[in-house]
Every structure is written in C-alpha cells, then in structure tokens.
Image (spheres, helix red, strand yellow):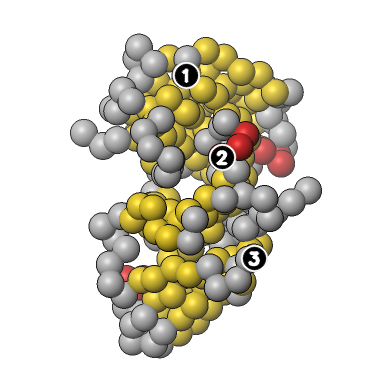
Amino acid sequence: EPEVTQTPSHQVTQMGQEVILRCVPISNHLYFYWYRQILGQKVEFLVSFYNNEISEKSEIFDDQFSVERPDGSNFTLKIRSTKLEDSAMYFCASRDPGTGTNIQYFGAGTRLSVL
Amino acid sequence: QKEVEQDPGPLSVPEGAIVSLNCTYSNSAFQYFMWYRQYSRKGPELLMYTYSSGNKEDGRFTAQVDKSSKYISLFIRDSQPSDSATYLCAMNDNAGNNRKLIWGLGTSLAVNP
C-alpha cells in the first residue's frame, strides 16, 4: 500500500541552526501539507502546497519556514534558524484531489528537538 | 469558542467494552469529518471518513455526524487492547482547494485485558 515517508525520524539540533525535514508523498497525489504537533497540544496546520507553490499558510509559517519540491518526489520543510519552541513532531501529508474526498494521508513524522 | 473541542481523557475501559469518543465543533461550514488513530510518537492513521451528516460503519467502528448539533462521534465495539491509542477528530470545509484539517486535541484510550 502506498505511504508517505518522512526522514529523519528524529532530528536533534542546536538553537539557531537550520534543519531540513524531508518527505516523499504518495506518488499520484497533488496536494502536500506540513503540520506540527507540540507535545500535549493539537495538531496544527502549517502550510499547503500545490502546483509547485504555496497555496495556503498559517500564522505559524513565518519567514523562518520555507517549503520546496526540489524534484518529482521529495517535499521538504526548511526551518532557517531554529528556536526552542520549534521542538515538535512535524507531519507531512498528501492528498489526491481526484478521489473527490478530503482524505489526507500522513507520514510517521519527524521529531524535532531543539536544544 | 475553540473550533474543535475534544475531551483528552484518559479513557480506560475493559476489553470487550463499547467505547464512545466525541468531538464538538463551532464552524457550521465543516462538511468533511475524519477520525484518525495515533499511536505514541507515530503519525495519524485514518480510521473513518464521513461527508456531511449520517452514520458510517466499518467493522467494529461506527462514525456518526450530527451537523444540527455540531457533534461527531466514533464508536468502537468489542474493544481490544490493540485499540489503545489516541483518537483524533479532524474536519474541514468545502471552501477552496486546500482543505486544511482542523483538529481536536485527541482522546487517549486504554483498553485493559
């Protein structure tokens, strides 16, 4: 069964460093998303991406965040200068608009720890 | 008022019990309702998907949506220890194409053998 894969599973970084979180969405999906979940809090939408551009972003997704689809398979989230409060689980999701549903399929997540 | 409210629990039940999980929401534009299961430190896994009002059944799981009350439920029959997880409700509307999901906090469920 096709699945969304994310790497790494756990990333430890020092405050102020740049990190890149990687995702391989399901191959025939066209919408891609990043969400984050701070421990004990709700899953929060960060950004959606379609047709090689951002289609919507939340207030959380400020200038330190960027997304890219560098090739036909990968979808990345870059955090330029990490802060302690960026520590969270980051989930990538993808959706196939051709199904007529809103179902989003999620990866296992990357746990980001900022020290 | 928060967009989606969900009692975080924890909920502890004996094996074989019927479990009822619920969410309320405030945005009347929501039309798509999902239940995801999340094991510790893993990604959300889709369990049930419902459009608009009504019931949907899949094996031991039944999802109900009451749009007039802005209330959704997930029932688990004959609960098993393997059902122990956090259950998250998520929903969105039909506006635009982005369809970002709005989430509840999740209810932690423990099914005891």
Residue at mark 2: chain: A
**Mark 2 belongs to which amino acid?**
Pro
**Mark 3 belongs to which amino acid?**
Ser
Q: Position of residue B72 (x, y in %)?
A: 45, 23
Residue with the mark numbered 1: B52
Residue drawn at x 62%, y 58% is A25
Residue with the mark numbered 3: A73
Q: Position of residue A1 (x, y in %)?
A: 78, 48
SS of the residue at dot 1? Answer: loop
SS of the residue at dot 2? Answer: helix
Name which quarter of the figure residue B110 lies in: top right
Image side of residue B21 versus residue A74, left or right: left
The first of marks 3 and 2 along the sequence is 3
Residue drawn at x 29%, y 35% is B3
C-alpha gap between disc 3 and disc 2: 17 Å
Instruction: Kindly indicate whether the residues beneath marks 1 and 3 are on one polypeptide chain.
Output: no
Residue with the mark numbered 2: A97
Image quadrant holding the C terminus of chain A, namely bottom left
Residue drawn at x 48%, y 61% is A52
